Image (cartoon, grey):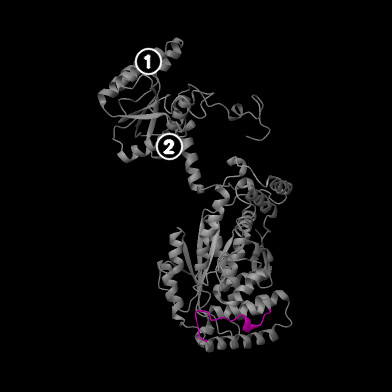
Protein backbone atom coordinates (compact mmCIF):
# COMPACT_ATOMS: atom_id res chain seq x y z
CA UNK A 1 0.00 0.00 0.00
CA UNK A 2 1.20 3.51 -0.74
CA UNK A 3 1.44 6.13 1.99
CA UNK A 4 -0.10 9.57 2.27
CA UNK A 5 1.17 12.62 4.07
CA UNK A 6 -1.69 14.34 5.87
CA UNK A 7 -0.16 17.58 6.98
CA UNK A 8 2.30 16.37 9.59
CA UNK A 9 1.63 12.61 9.74
CA UNK A 10 2.36 9.99 7.12
CA UNK A 11 -0.19 7.16 7.20
CA UNK A 12 -0.69 4.07 5.03
CA UNK A 13 -3.39 4.10 2.36
CA UNK A 14 -6.42 2.02 3.37
CA UNK A 15 -8.66 0.38 0.77
CA UNK A 16 -12.39 -0.11 1.44
CA UNK A 17 -13.47 -3.54 2.62
CA UNK A 18 -15.12 -5.85 0.07
CA UNK A 19 -18.86 -5.37 0.49
CA UNK A 20 -19.55 -7.90 -2.26
CA UNK A 21 -17.80 -10.57 -0.20
CA UNK A 22 -19.89 -9.65 2.84
CA UNK A 23 -23.04 -10.29 0.79
CA UNK A 24 -21.76 -13.66 -0.35
CA UNK A 25 -20.86 -14.54 3.22
CA UNK A 26 -24.36 -13.59 4.38
CA UNK A 27 -25.85 -15.77 1.62
CA UNK A 28 -23.91 -18.74 2.96
CA UNK A 29 -24.98 -17.95 6.52
CA UNK A 30 -28.58 -18.03 5.32
CA UNK A 31 -28.01 -21.47 3.80
CA UNK A 32 -26.84 -23.01 7.10
CA UNK A 33 -29.09 -25.31 9.12
CA UNK A 34 -30.47 -22.62 11.41
CA UNK A 35 -33.27 -20.03 11.31
CA UNK A 36 -32.50 -16.92 9.28
CA UNK A 37 -30.62 -14.33 11.32
CA UNK A 38 -30.62 -16.55 14.41
CA UNK A 39 -26.95 -15.91 15.23
CA UNK A 40 -27.83 -12.29 15.96
CA UNK A 41 -24.85 -9.95 16.17
CA UNK A 42 -22.49 -12.75 15.20
CA UNK A 43 -23.75 -12.69 11.62
CA UNK A 44 -22.66 -9.12 10.80
CA UNK A 45 -19.41 -9.88 12.62
CA UNK A 46 -18.73 -12.87 10.35
CA UNK A 47 -19.65 -10.85 7.26
CA UNK A 48 -17.40 -7.98 8.37
CA UNK A 49 -14.41 -10.29 8.70
CA UNK A 50 -15.28 -11.87 5.34
CA UNK A 51 -15.30 -8.41 3.75
CA UNK A 52 -11.93 -7.63 5.32
CA UNK A 53 -10.24 -10.89 4.34
CA UNK A 54 -11.90 -11.32 0.95
CA UNK A 55 -13.13 -14.82 1.84
CA UNK A 56 -16.69 -16.09 2.06
CA UNK A 57 -15.72 -18.25 5.02
CA UNK A 58 -13.15 -16.24 7.00
CA UNK A 59 -10.68 -17.69 9.48
CA UNK A 60 -7.81 -16.66 11.72
CA UNK A 61 -4.63 -18.66 12.15
CA UNK A 62 -2.11 -16.24 13.68
CA UNK A 63 -3.62 -13.62 16.03
CA UNK A 64 -1.26 -11.44 18.06
CA UNK A 65 -1.77 -9.47 21.27
CA UNK A 66 -0.05 -6.09 21.11
CA UNK A 67 0.25 -3.79 24.15
CA UNK A 68 1.59 -0.22 24.18
CA UNK A 69 2.67 1.32 27.50
CA UNK A 70 3.32 4.98 28.33
CA UNK A 71 2.95 7.49 31.14
CA UNK A 72 1.01 10.76 31.28
CA UNK A 73 2.24 14.05 32.72
CA UNK A 74 -1.20 15.01 34.00
CA UNK A 75 -1.17 12.02 36.39
CA UNK A 76 2.17 13.11 37.85
CA UNK A 77 1.02 16.70 38.28
CA UNK A 78 -2.48 16.08 39.67
CA UNK A 79 -4.26 13.58 41.91
CA UNK A 80 -6.57 12.18 39.22
CA UNK A 81 -5.80 8.46 39.66
CA UNK A 82 -5.85 5.95 42.50
CA UNK A 83 -2.38 4.81 41.42
CA UNK A 84 0.97 6.50 41.09
CA UNK A 85 2.87 6.69 37.82
CA UNK A 86 5.28 3.99 38.98
CA UNK A 87 2.47 1.48 38.43
CA UNK A 88 2.76 1.81 34.64
CA UNK A 89 6.25 0.31 34.69
CA UNK A 90 5.29 -2.30 37.26
CA UNK A 91 2.26 -3.41 35.26
CA UNK A 92 4.24 -3.50 32.01
CA UNK A 93 6.56 -5.96 33.75
CA UNK A 94 3.54 -7.88 35.04
CA UNK A 95 2.16 -8.23 31.52
CA UNK A 96 5.53 -9.30 30.14
CA UNK A 97 5.84 -11.90 32.92
CA UNK A 98 2.50 -13.38 31.92
CA UNK A 99 0.81 -12.68 35.24
CA UNK A 100 -1.59 -9.86 34.34
CA UNK A 101 -5.25 -10.51 33.53
CA UNK A 102 -4.62 -9.91 29.84
CA UNK A 103 -1.49 -12.05 29.69
CA UNK A 104 -3.29 -14.94 31.38
CA UNK A 105 -6.02 -14.84 28.73
CA UNK A 106 -3.54 -14.51 25.87
CA UNK A 107 -1.66 -17.55 27.18
CA UNK A 108 -4.91 -19.50 27.45
CA UNK A 109 -5.53 -18.90 23.75
CA UNK A 110 -1.94 -19.71 22.77
CA UNK A 111 -1.48 -16.13 21.62
CA UNK A 112 1.91 -14.42 21.80
CA UNK A 113 2.07 -11.09 23.67
CA UNK A 114 4.25 -8.16 22.62
CA UNK A 115 4.65 -5.27 25.08
CA UNK A 116 6.07 -2.05 23.66
CA UNK A 117 7.37 0.75 25.91
CA UNK A 118 6.51 3.81 23.87
CA UNK A 119 6.81 6.32 26.72
CA UNK A 120 7.09 4.93 30.26
CA UNK A 121 8.75 7.39 32.67
CA UNK A 122 11.34 4.90 33.87
CA UNK A 123 13.18 1.98 32.27
CA UNK A 124 10.99 -1.11 32.24
CA UNK A 125 12.74 -3.91 34.09
CA UNK A 126 11.94 -6.85 31.84
CA UNK A 127 13.94 -8.08 28.83
CA UNK A 128 10.86 -9.02 26.80
CA UNK A 129 9.49 -5.47 26.82
CA UNK A 130 10.34 -3.80 23.51
CA UNK A 131 11.77 -0.31 24.08
CA UNK A 132 10.58 2.27 21.52
CA UNK A 133 10.47 5.31 23.82
CA UNK A 134 9.25 8.51 22.21
CA UNK A 135 9.79 10.28 25.52
CA UNK A 136 9.70 9.62 29.25
CA UNK A 137 6.00 10.28 29.61
CA UNK A 138 4.03 13.13 28.09
CA UNK A 139 3.84 16.64 29.44
CA UNK A 140 0.90 17.78 31.59
CA UNK A 141 -1.77 18.65 29.02
CA UNK A 142 -3.54 20.94 31.50
CA UNK A 143 -0.54 23.26 31.20
CA UNK A 144 0.11 22.91 27.45
CA UNK A 145 0.50 20.30 24.69
CA UNK A 146 1.09 16.76 25.91
CA UNK A 147 3.61 16.15 23.13
CA UNK A 148 5.37 17.93 20.32
CA UNK A 149 4.44 17.47 16.69
CA UNK A 150 7.61 15.44 16.17
CA UNK A 151 6.77 13.19 19.12
CA UNK A 152 3.29 12.65 17.69
CA UNK A 153 4.72 11.57 14.34
CA UNK A 154 7.20 9.27 16.06
CA UNK A 155 4.55 7.65 18.28
CA UNK A 156 2.25 6.98 15.32
CA UNK A 157 5.19 5.49 13.42
CA UNK A 158 5.97 3.15 16.32
CA UNK A 159 2.47 1.71 16.02
CA UNK A 160 2.79 1.38 12.24
CA UNK A 161 6.18 -0.32 12.52
CA UNK A 162 5.06 -2.77 15.18
CA UNK A 163 2.06 -3.95 13.20
CA UNK A 164 3.94 -4.25 9.91
CA UNK A 165 6.52 -6.36 11.73
CA UNK A 166 3.80 -8.71 13.00
CA UNK A 167 2.19 -8.89 9.57
CA UNK A 168 5.53 -9.92 8.05
CA UNK A 169 5.53 -12.79 10.55
CA UNK A 170 2.14 -13.96 9.29
CA UNK A 171 -0.17 -12.22 11.79
CA UNK A 172 -3.77 -12.05 10.54
CA UNK A 173 -5.51 -10.32 13.48
CA UNK A 174 -4.36 -7.75 16.05
CA UNK A 175 -5.81 -7.56 19.56
CA UNK A 176 -4.85 -4.21 21.10
CA UNK A 177 -4.16 -3.30 24.68
CA UNK A 178 -2.51 -0.45 26.58
CA UNK A 179 -1.06 0.47 29.94
CA UNK A 180 -0.64 3.99 31.30
CA UNK A 181 -1.64 5.68 34.54
CA UNK A 182 -3.67 8.80 33.70
CA UNK A 183 -4.65 7.71 30.23
CA UNK A 184 -8.41 7.85 30.84
CA UNK A 185 -8.00 11.61 31.31
CA UNK A 186 -6.30 11.87 27.91
CA UNK A 187 -8.89 9.62 26.28
CA UNK A 188 -11.82 11.56 27.75
CA UNK A 189 -10.33 14.90 26.68
CA UNK A 190 -9.61 13.61 23.19
CA UNK A 191 -13.15 12.24 22.89
CA UNK A 192 -14.72 15.52 24.02
CA UNK A 193 -12.61 17.33 21.44
CA UNK A 194 -13.31 14.99 18.51
CA UNK A 195 -17.04 14.47 19.19
CA UNK A 196 -17.69 17.99 20.48
CA UNK A 197 -19.58 16.65 23.49
CA UNK A 198 -19.83 18.10 27.01
CA UNK A 199 -16.88 17.11 29.17
CA UNK A 200 -19.03 16.38 32.22
CA UNK A 201 -20.99 13.78 30.24
CA UNK A 202 -17.82 11.93 29.28
CA UNK A 203 -15.57 11.87 32.36
CA UNK A 204 -15.92 8.75 34.49
CA UNK A 205 -14.21 7.36 37.57
CA UNK A 206 -11.46 5.59 35.63
CA UNK A 207 -9.73 3.14 37.94
CA UNK A 208 -12.18 3.96 40.71
CA UNK A 209 -11.41 7.50 41.88
CA UNK A 210 -13.70 9.33 44.30
CA UNK A 211 -16.05 12.12 43.31
CA UNK A 212 -13.64 14.89 44.33
CA UNK A 213 -10.95 13.44 42.08
CA UNK A 214 -13.45 13.02 39.26
CA UNK A 215 -14.44 16.70 39.53
CA UNK A 216 -10.77 17.71 39.48
CA UNK A 217 -10.24 15.55 36.44
CA UNK A 218 -13.27 17.09 34.72
CA UNK A 219 -12.22 20.65 35.52
CA UNK A 220 -8.68 20.11 34.26
CA UNK A 221 -10.00 18.68 31.00
CA UNK A 222 -12.54 21.47 30.55
CA UNK A 223 -9.95 24.18 31.15
CA UNK A 224 -7.53 22.54 28.72
CA UNK A 225 -10.25 22.04 26.12
CA UNK A 226 -11.29 25.69 26.30
CA UNK A 227 -7.69 26.76 25.80
CA UNK A 228 -7.20 24.40 22.85
CA UNK A 229 -10.43 25.46 21.13
CA UNK A 230 -9.29 29.06 21.16
CA UNK A 231 -5.84 28.20 19.78
CA UNK A 232 -7.16 25.85 17.08
CA UNK A 233 -10.10 27.96 15.95
CA UNK A 234 -8.47 28.98 12.67
CA UNK A 235 -6.93 25.59 11.83
CA UNK A 236 -8.17 23.28 9.06
CA UNK A 237 -10.12 20.14 10.09
CA UNK A 238 -7.10 17.87 9.57
CA UNK A 239 -4.88 20.24 11.53
CA UNK A 240 -7.44 20.35 14.36
CA UNK A 241 -7.67 16.57 14.57
CA UNK A 242 -3.93 16.10 14.57
CA UNK A 243 -3.33 18.88 17.06
CA UNK A 244 -5.99 17.33 19.33
CA UNK A 245 -3.83 14.22 19.79
CA UNK A 246 -0.72 16.34 20.30
CA UNK A 247 -2.50 18.45 22.93
CA UNK A 248 -4.42 15.81 24.89
CA UNK A 249 -3.14 12.40 23.84
CA UNK A 250 -0.59 9.94 25.08
CA UNK A 251 2.25 8.19 23.30
CA UNK A 252 0.42 4.86 23.65
CA UNK A 253 -2.80 6.35 22.24
CA UNK A 254 -0.98 7.67 19.17
CA UNK A 255 0.86 4.35 18.74
CA UNK A 256 -2.40 2.40 18.89
CA UNK A 257 -3.88 4.67 16.24
CA UNK A 258 -0.87 4.03 14.04
CA UNK A 259 -1.26 0.30 14.65
CA UNK A 260 -4.89 0.41 13.53
CA UNK A 261 -4.06 2.35 10.38
CA UNK A 262 -1.23 -0.03 9.47
CA UNK A 263 -3.34 -3.13 10.14
CA UNK A 264 -6.20 -1.82 7.99
CA UNK A 265 -3.78 -1.02 5.18
CA UNK A 266 -2.84 -4.72 5.13
CA UNK A 267 -6.46 -5.92 5.42
CA UNK A 268 -5.92 -7.10 9.00
CA UNK A 269 -8.80 -6.65 11.49
CA UNK A 270 -8.17 -5.09 14.89
CA UNK A 271 -10.07 -6.11 18.04
CA UNK A 272 -10.50 -3.09 20.32
CA UNK A 273 -10.53 -3.10 24.10
CA UNK A 274 -12.17 -0.27 26.03
CA UNK A 275 -12.07 3.51 26.29
CA UNK A 276 -8.40 3.93 25.41
CA UNK A 277 -8.40 1.89 22.23
CA UNK A 278 -11.75 3.48 21.40
CA UNK A 279 -10.34 7.01 21.64
CA UNK A 280 -7.39 6.00 19.46
CA UNK A 281 -9.80 4.48 16.94
CA UNK A 282 -11.87 7.65 16.90
CA UNK A 283 -8.79 9.71 16.10
CA UNK A 284 -7.55 7.22 13.47
CA UNK A 285 -10.97 7.37 11.79
CA UNK A 286 -10.60 11.14 11.51
CA UNK A 287 -7.42 10.54 9.51
CA UNK A 288 -8.96 7.83 7.30
CA UNK A 289 -12.63 6.87 7.61
CA UNK A 290 -12.01 3.47 5.98
CA UNK A 291 -10.24 2.27 9.12
CA UNK A 292 -13.59 1.93 10.94
CA UNK A 293 -14.60 -1.09 8.88
CA UNK A 294 -11.49 -2.97 10.03
CA UNK A 295 -12.27 -2.51 13.74
CA UNK A 296 -14.14 -4.93 16.01
CA UNK A 297 -15.41 -3.69 19.38
CA UNK A 298 -14.57 -6.31 21.97
CA UNK A 299 -16.65 -4.81 24.78
CA UNK A 300 -18.13 -1.61 26.17
CA UNK A 301 -16.70 -0.23 29.40
CA UNK A 302 -18.63 1.69 32.09
CA UNK A 303 -16.72 4.87 31.18
CA UNK A 304 -19.40 7.13 29.62
CA UNK A 305 -17.03 8.32 26.90
CA UNK A 306 -16.68 4.77 25.57
CA UNK A 307 -20.35 4.40 24.68
CA UNK A 308 -20.21 7.73 22.85
CA UNK A 309 -17.13 6.58 20.93
CA UNK A 310 -18.70 3.27 19.86
CA UNK A 311 -21.82 5.06 18.69
CA UNK A 312 -19.72 7.49 16.65
CA UNK A 313 -17.78 4.62 15.11
CA UNK A 314 -20.95 2.66 14.40
CA UNK A 315 -19.73 -0.28 16.47
CA UNK A 316 -21.81 -2.70 18.50
CA UNK A 317 -19.71 -4.26 21.28
CA UNK A 318 -19.58 -8.05 21.58
CA UNK A 319 -19.53 -8.00 25.39
CA UNK A 320 -20.90 -5.80 28.19
CA UNK A 321 -19.32 -7.04 31.40
CA UNK A 322 -18.67 -3.73 33.21
CA UNK A 323 -14.93 -4.28 32.82
CA UNK A 324 -12.51 -1.62 34.07
CA UNK A 325 -9.32 -3.65 33.78
CA UNK A 326 -7.86 -2.22 30.59
CA UNK A 327 -4.65 -3.77 29.20
CA UNK A 328 -6.63 -5.42 26.38
CA UNK A 329 -8.56 -7.73 28.72
CA UNK A 330 -11.91 -6.96 27.11
CA UNK A 331 -10.56 -7.61 23.63
CA UNK A 332 -9.16 -10.95 24.76
CA UNK A 333 -12.36 -11.98 26.50
CA UNK A 334 -14.18 -11.34 23.22
CA UNK A 335 -11.78 -13.58 21.28
CA UNK A 336 -13.62 -16.88 21.96
CA UNK A 337 -16.82 -15.23 20.75
CA UNK A 338 -15.11 -14.21 17.51
CA UNK A 339 -13.47 -17.57 16.88
CA UNK A 340 -16.64 -19.39 17.89
CA UNK A 341 -18.60 -17.40 15.33
CA UNK A 342 -16.11 -18.27 12.60
CA UNK A 343 -16.20 -21.94 13.58
CA UNK A 344 -19.98 -21.92 13.29
CA UNK A 345 -19.62 -20.46 9.82
CA UNK A 346 -17.07 -23.03 8.66
CA UNK A 347 -18.40 -26.21 10.28
CA UNK A 348 -22.19 -25.89 10.38
CA UNK A 349 -23.79 -27.89 7.58
CA UNK A 350 -25.91 -26.24 4.93
CA UNK A 351 -29.45 -27.49 4.42
CA UNK A 352 -28.32 -29.08 1.18
CA UNK A 353 -25.28 -30.81 2.66
CA UNK A 354 -27.23 -32.12 5.65
CA UNK A 355 -30.17 -33.15 3.43
CA UNK A 356 -32.49 -31.18 5.70
CA UNK A 357 -35.58 -29.51 4.26
CA UNK A 358 -34.94 -25.79 4.01
CA UNK A 359 -37.99 -23.93 5.40
CA UNK A 360 -36.85 -20.64 3.92
CA UNK A 361 -35.44 -21.91 0.62
CA UNK A 362 -37.13 -19.27 -1.53
CA UNK A 363 -35.81 -16.41 0.58
CA UNK A 364 -32.33 -17.95 0.72
CA UNK A 365 -32.26 -18.42 -3.05
CA UNK A 366 -33.19 -14.78 -3.56
CA UNK A 367 -30.40 -13.65 -1.25
CA UNK A 368 -27.93 -16.04 -2.89
CA UNK A 369 -28.83 -14.71 -6.33
CA UNK A 370 -28.33 -11.16 -5.10
CA UNK A 371 -24.93 -12.07 -3.68
CA UNK A 372 -23.96 -13.90 -6.86
CA UNK A 373 -24.72 -10.81 -8.93
CA UNK A 374 -22.18 -8.95 -6.83
CA UNK A 375 -19.58 -11.70 -7.08
CA UNK A 376 -16.30 -10.43 -8.38
CA UNK A 377 -17.43 -6.81 -8.22
CA UNK A 378 -14.79 -5.99 -5.64
CA UNK A 379 -13.03 -9.26 -4.98
CA UNK A 380 -10.20 -8.77 -7.46
CA UNK A 381 -7.31 -11.13 -6.83
CA UNK A 382 -7.91 -11.67 -3.11
CA UNK A 383 -10.17 -14.69 -3.02
CA UNK A 384 -8.17 -17.18 -5.14
CA UNK A 385 -5.03 -16.65 -3.08
CA UNK A 386 -6.59 -17.01 0.36
CA UNK A 387 -7.81 -20.53 1.20
CA UNK A 388 -10.93 -20.78 3.33
CA UNK A 389 -9.44 -23.39 5.64
CA UNK A 390 -5.67 -23.08 5.83
CA UNK A 391 -4.03 -24.11 9.08
CA UNK A 392 -0.51 -24.58 7.71
CA UNK A 393 2.13 -21.89 7.81
CA UNK A 394 3.92 -21.20 4.54
CA UNK A 395 6.98 -22.99 5.92
CA UNK A 396 4.86 -26.07 6.62
CA UNK A 397 3.33 -25.92 3.14
CA UNK A 398 6.79 -25.71 1.62
CA UNK A 399 7.89 -28.70 3.70
CA UNK A 400 5.05 -30.87 2.36
CA UNK A 401 5.98 -30.13 -1.25
CA UNK A 402 9.65 -30.60 -0.47
CA UNK A 403 8.96 -34.10 0.86
CA UNK A 404 6.90 -34.96 -2.23
CA UNK A 405 9.53 -33.74 -4.70
CA UNK A 406 12.46 -35.19 -2.75
CA UNK A 407 10.96 -38.69 -2.28
CA UNK A 408 13.08 -41.38 -3.93
CA UNK A 409 13.02 -45.18 -4.27
CA UNK A 410 16.25 -46.11 -2.48
CA UNK A 411 18.31 -49.31 -2.80
CA UNK A 412 21.45 -48.36 -0.86
CA UNK A 413 21.21 -48.57 2.94
CA UNK A 414 23.41 -48.19 5.98
CA UNK A 415 23.18 -50.97 8.61
CA UNK A 416 22.34 -48.61 11.50
CA UNK A 417 19.22 -49.52 13.43
CA UNK A 418 16.36 -47.04 13.21
CA UNK A 419 15.10 -45.50 16.47
CA UNK A 420 11.83 -47.05 17.61
CA UNK A 421 10.04 -43.70 17.82
CA UNK A 422 10.94 -42.90 14.20
CA UNK A 423 9.61 -46.25 12.99
CA UNK A 424 6.47 -45.73 15.05
CA UNK A 425 5.82 -42.33 13.44
CA UNK A 426 6.27 -43.76 9.96
CA UNK A 427 3.86 -46.62 10.69
CA UNK A 428 1.32 -44.22 12.17
CA UNK A 429 1.58 -42.06 9.06
CA UNK A 430 0.60 -45.12 7.03
CA UNK A 431 -2.25 -45.90 9.38
CA UNK A 432 -3.60 -42.38 8.84
CA UNK A 433 -3.84 -42.90 5.11
CA UNK A 434 -7.16 -42.24 3.36
CA UNK A 435 -9.30 -45.29 2.67
CA UNK A 436 -12.53 -45.77 0.77
CA UNK A 437 -15.43 -46.41 3.12
CA UNK A 438 -12.94 -46.08 6.00
CA UNK A 439 -12.17 -49.78 5.47
CA UNK A 440 -8.46 -49.43 6.45
CA UNK A 441 -7.50 -52.66 4.66
CA UNK A 442 -3.83 -52.54 5.61
CA UNK A 443 -1.59 -54.33 8.11
CA UNK A 444 2.12 -53.76 8.65
CA UNK A 445 4.50 -56.67 9.29
CA UNK A 446 7.77 -55.25 10.64
CA UNK A 447 10.66 -57.59 9.81
CA UNK A 448 14.14 -57.34 11.35
CA UNK A 449 15.04 -61.05 11.62
CA UNK A 450 17.95 -61.59 9.20
CA UNK A 451 16.92 -65.20 8.44
CA UNK A 452 13.46 -64.04 7.40
CA UNK A 453 14.95 -61.22 5.33
CA UNK A 454 17.33 -63.63 3.56
CA UNK A 455 14.39 -65.91 2.76
CA UNK A 456 12.53 -62.97 1.24
CA UNK A 457 15.61 -61.92 -0.67
CA UNK A 458 15.88 -65.40 -2.19
CA UNK A 459 12.35 -65.39 -3.59
CA UNK A 460 12.83 -61.85 -4.88
CA UNK A 461 16.08 -62.82 -6.62
CA UNK A 462 14.33 -65.76 -8.31
CA UNK A 463 11.63 -63.48 -9.68
CA UNK A 464 14.15 -60.77 -10.59
CA UNK A 465 15.86 -63.16 -12.98
CA UNK A 466 12.52 -64.26 -14.43
CA UNK A 467 11.48 -60.62 -14.88
CA UNK A 468 14.40 -60.06 -17.26
CA UNK A 469 13.42 -62.85 -19.65
CA UNK A 470 11.06 -60.73 -21.85
CA UNK A 471 13.83 -58.24 -22.69
CA UNK A 472 16.36 -58.49 -25.50
CA UNK A 473 19.81 -59.75 -24.58
CA UNK A 474 21.35 -56.29 -24.29
CA UNK A 475 18.52 -54.84 -22.25
CA UNK A 476 18.34 -58.01 -20.13
CA UNK A 477 22.00 -57.63 -19.22
CA UNK A 478 21.40 -53.97 -18.44
CA UNK A 479 18.40 -54.83 -16.25
CA UNK A 480 20.21 -57.59 -14.37
CA UNK A 481 22.97 -55.14 -13.42
CA UNK A 482 20.42 -52.85 -11.74
CA UNK A 483 20.05 -53.13 -7.99
CA UNK A 484 16.33 -53.56 -7.41
CA UNK A 485 16.22 -54.36 -3.71
CA UNK A 486 18.05 -53.94 -0.42
CA UNK A 487 16.36 -56.58 1.70
CA UNK A 488 19.55 -57.84 3.34
CA UNK A 489 21.39 -54.51 3.60
CA UNK A 490 18.52 -52.50 5.12
CA UNK A 491 18.05 -52.92 8.88
CA UNK A 492 14.31 -53.38 8.48
CA UNK A 493 11.64 -54.33 5.96
CA UNK A 494 7.93 -53.65 6.34
CA UNK A 495 5.50 -55.85 4.51
CA UNK A 496 2.34 -53.86 3.84
CA UNK A 497 -0.63 -56.14 3.33
CA UNK A 498 -4.05 -55.56 1.82
CA UNK A 499 -7.14 -57.36 3.11
CA UNK A 500 -9.98 -57.08 0.53
CA UNK A 501 -12.46 -58.53 3.07
CA UNK A 502 -11.85 -55.73 5.61
CA UNK A 503 -15.11 -53.90 6.27
CA UNK A 504 -17.32 -56.80 5.15
CA UNK A 505 -18.92 -57.52 1.77
CA UNK A 506 -20.53 -54.07 1.42
CA UNK A 507 -18.02 -51.27 1.86
CA UNK A 508 -19.27 -47.74 1.33
CA UNK A 509 -17.98 -46.44 -2.00
CA UNK A 510 -16.66 -49.79 -3.27
CA UNK A 511 -19.78 -51.04 -5.02
CA UNK A 512 -18.58 -50.19 -8.54
CA UNK A 513 -14.78 -50.14 -8.15
CA UNK A 514 -13.83 -53.21 -6.10
CA UNK A 515 -10.08 -52.54 -6.24
CA UNK A 516 -10.42 -49.42 -4.11
CA UNK A 517 -9.16 -51.51 -1.20
CA UNK A 518 -5.79 -51.80 -2.96
CA UNK A 519 -5.92 -48.10 -3.85
CA UNK A 520 -6.39 -47.33 -0.17
CA UNK A 521 -3.40 -49.44 0.80
CA UNK A 522 -1.33 -47.62 -1.83
CA UNK A 523 -2.27 -44.35 -0.14
CA UNK A 524 -0.99 -45.73 3.16
CA UNK A 525 2.29 -46.66 1.48
CA UNK A 526 2.67 -43.16 0.06
CA UNK A 527 2.02 -41.66 3.51
CA UNK A 528 4.79 -43.83 4.94
CA UNK A 529 7.16 -42.89 2.14
CA UNK A 530 6.66 -39.15 2.63
CA UNK A 531 6.95 -39.45 6.40
CA UNK A 532 10.16 -41.47 6.02
CA UNK A 533 11.65 -38.86 3.68
CA UNK A 534 10.79 -36.08 6.14
CA UNK A 535 12.52 -38.11 8.90
CA UNK A 536 15.62 -38.54 6.74
CA UNK A 537 14.90 -42.26 6.37
CA UNK A 538 15.28 -44.02 3.01
CA UNK A 539 12.62 -46.38 1.65
CA UNK A 540 12.59 -48.77 -1.29
CA UNK A 541 9.54 -50.55 -2.70
CA UNK A 542 10.23 -54.17 -3.60
CA UNK A 543 7.50 -55.64 -5.82
CA UNK A 544 9.24 -58.50 -7.65
CA UNK A 545 7.93 -61.60 -5.89
CA UNK A 546 5.20 -64.19 -5.97
CA UNK A 547 2.56 -63.44 -3.35
CA UNK A 548 2.30 -67.06 -2.26
CA UNK A 549 6.04 -67.19 -1.53
CA UNK A 550 5.80 -64.15 0.73
CA UNK A 551 2.60 -65.44 2.35
CA UNK A 552 4.38 -68.69 3.22
CA UNK A 553 7.47 -67.00 4.68
CA UNK A 554 5.51 -64.49 6.77
CA UNK A 555 2.49 -66.67 7.64
CA UNK A 556 0.02 -64.34 5.95
CA UNK A 557 -3.53 -65.74 5.48
CA UNK A 558 -4.43 -66.76 1.94
CA UNK A 559 -7.11 -64.08 1.52
CA UNK A 560 -4.67 -61.28 2.42
CA UNK A 561 -2.33 -59.91 -0.24
CA UNK A 562 1.25 -58.86 0.53
CA UNK A 563 1.00 -55.59 -1.42
CA UNK A 564 4.55 -54.34 -0.91
CA UNK A 565 7.87 -55.06 0.74
CA UNK A 566 9.29 -51.73 1.91
CA UNK A 567 12.96 -51.74 2.85
CA UNK A 568 13.78 -48.85 5.17
CA UNK A 569 16.89 -47.48 6.83
CA UNK A 570 19.37 -44.67 6.65
CA UNK A 571 21.16 -44.01 3.37
CA UNK A 572 24.37 -42.13 2.59
CA UNK A 573 22.70 -40.17 -0.20
CA UNK A 574 19.28 -39.16 -1.55
CA UNK A 575 19.76 -38.72 -5.33
CA UNK A 576 18.49 -35.59 -7.04
CA UNK A 577 16.61 -37.60 -9.69
CA UNK A 578 14.94 -41.04 -9.53
CA UNK A 579 17.22 -44.07 -9.97
CA UNK A 580 15.66 -45.38 -13.20
CA UNK A 581 15.83 -41.94 -14.75
CA UNK A 582 19.42 -41.51 -13.63
CA UNK A 583 20.53 -44.82 -15.21
CA UNK A 584 18.64 -44.07 -18.41
CA UNK A 585 15.86 -46.64 -18.01
CA UNK A 586 13.15 -44.02 -18.48
CA UNK A 587 12.27 -40.35 -18.10
CA UNK A 588 9.44 -38.48 -16.40
CA UNK A 589 6.65 -37.71 -18.84
CA UNK A 590 6.06 -34.10 -19.67
CA UNK A 591 3.48 -32.62 -17.30
CA UNK A 592 1.45 -31.05 -20.13
CA UNK A 593 1.00 -34.50 -21.71
CA UNK A 594 -0.73 -36.01 -18.69
CA UNK A 595 -3.27 -33.24 -17.96
CA UNK A 596 -6.60 -33.09 -19.81
CA UNK A 597 -9.54 -30.78 -19.24
CA UNK A 598 -13.21 -31.84 -19.22
CA UNK A 599 -12.69 -34.72 -21.69
CA UNK A 600 -9.94 -37.22 -22.47
CA UNK A 601 -7.38 -35.78 -24.85
CA UNK A 602 -8.48 -32.15 -24.51
CA UNK A 603 -5.59 -29.99 -23.42
CA UNK A 604 -6.31 -27.30 -20.81
CA UNK A 605 -6.79 -23.80 -22.13
CA UNK A 606 -5.10 -22.46 -19.03
CA UNK A 607 -1.35 -22.41 -18.64
CA UNK A 608 0.04 -25.48 -16.85
Q: Is residue 419 visible?
A: no
Image quarter for residue 93?
bottom left
Taking depth in this image into account, of 41 and 68 the one nearest to the observer is: 41
Image quarter for residue 84?
bottom left
Give yes or no for residue 374 being in the magenta stretch.
no
Image point 58% across, 50% down: which residue? Answer: 345
Q: Which residue is mark 2?
A: 432
Dot 1: few (<14), some (14–19), or many (≥20) neighbours within 10 Å? some
Image point 40% across, 29% down: which residue? Answer: 442
Where the N terminus falls, by quadrant?
bottom right
Give yes or no for residue 197 being in the magenta stretch.
yes
Which of the two labelled residues, at mark 1 and mark 2, occupies the earlier sequence position?
A: 2
Q: Which residue is mark 1?
A: 463
Residue 39 position within the rendered picture, expressed as x and y whole percent measured from the top left = 60, 56
Question: Is 387 left or right of 402, judged from the image as shown?
Answer: right
Question: Is 421 left or right of 516, judged from the image as shown?
Answer: left
Residue 485 position within the rendered picture, expressed as x and y whole percent measured from the top left = 36, 23
Q: Does residue 417 lie above or below 198 as drawn?
A: above
Q: Mark 1–mark 2 contact, CB under 8 Å? A: no
Question: Is 448 left or right of 17, judged from the image as shown?
Answer: left
User: Which stretch did the figure color magenta?
Assistant: 196-210
Q: Is residue 349 visible?
A: yes
Q: Does residue 494 lie above or below 393 as drawn?
A: above
Amino acid sequence: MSDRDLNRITIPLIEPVLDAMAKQSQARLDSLTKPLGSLGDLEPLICQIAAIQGRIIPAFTAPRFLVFAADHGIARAHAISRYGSEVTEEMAVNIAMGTSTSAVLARQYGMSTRVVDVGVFTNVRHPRVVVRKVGRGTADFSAGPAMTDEQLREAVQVGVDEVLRLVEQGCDCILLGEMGIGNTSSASALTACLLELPVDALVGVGTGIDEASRRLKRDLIQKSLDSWCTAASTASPHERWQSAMARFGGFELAAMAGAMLAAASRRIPVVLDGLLTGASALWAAKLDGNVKDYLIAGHVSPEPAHSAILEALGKRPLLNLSLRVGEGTGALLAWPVITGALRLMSETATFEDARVTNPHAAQSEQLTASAASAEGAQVGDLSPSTPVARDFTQAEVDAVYKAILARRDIRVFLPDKLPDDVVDRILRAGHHGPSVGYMQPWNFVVIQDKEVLRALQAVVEKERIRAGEPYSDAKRDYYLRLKVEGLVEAPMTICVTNDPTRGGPHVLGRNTIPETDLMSTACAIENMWLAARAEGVAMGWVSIYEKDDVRKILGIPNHVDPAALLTIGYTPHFPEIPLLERVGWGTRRDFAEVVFENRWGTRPARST
